[in-house]
Amino acid sequence: MQAKLQEQLSPADAEVILRRLPKRIQAALIARAAEIEDPIAAAIANFLDTEALGFVDCKPGRGQ
């Protein structure tokens, strides 16, 4: 069986990632999610690529 490539991060997976980060990073991502009025997954993608709207168009390091 071959693994299916996903272009999106589920809300549950985003929460798992978030909880494993240092508290100050958690707080920054939660604040960013509120600022862009999007879920945590979008805030993580936006942190990696400031021009990304989500993981589909995320190119880490772009826009920084």
Image (tube, grey):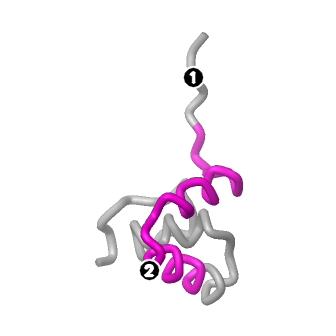
Q: Which residue is mark 2?
A: 24
Amino acid at the residue labelled 2: Arg
Residue 51, by quadrant, is: bottom left
Residue 58 image point, x, y percent: 45, 60
Placement of the C terminus among the 4 image quadrants: bottom left
The span from disc 2 to disc 1 (Cα, nearest Å) is 33 Å
Above or below — where is 7 with respect to 50? above
Disc 2 is placed on an element classified as helix
The residue positioned farthest toward the top in the image shown: 1
Task: Check disc 1 and report its element: helix, strand or loop.
Answer: loop
Residue displayed at 55% across by 63% down: 18
Q: Residues within 10 Å of mark 2 (few under 14, many from 20)?
A: few
Q: Is residue 9 left or right of residue 64?
A: right
Callout 1 crowding tier (Cα within 10 Å): few <14, some 14–19, many ≥20 = few
- Residue 31 is covered by the magenta coloring: yes
The residue sitting at 62% across, 84% down in the picture is: 36
Q: Is residue 9 left or right of residue 50?
A: right
Name the dominant secondary structure of the magenta segment. helix
Say which residue appears at 30% left-offset and 66% top-offset: 61
The residue nearer to you, when weighing 18 against 2, is: 18
Residue at coordinates 56% horizontally, 62% vertically from top-left? 19
Q: Residue furthest bottom?
A: 35
Disc 1 marks a residue whose amino acid type is: Ala
Residue 16 image offset from top left, x and y in percent: 60, 54
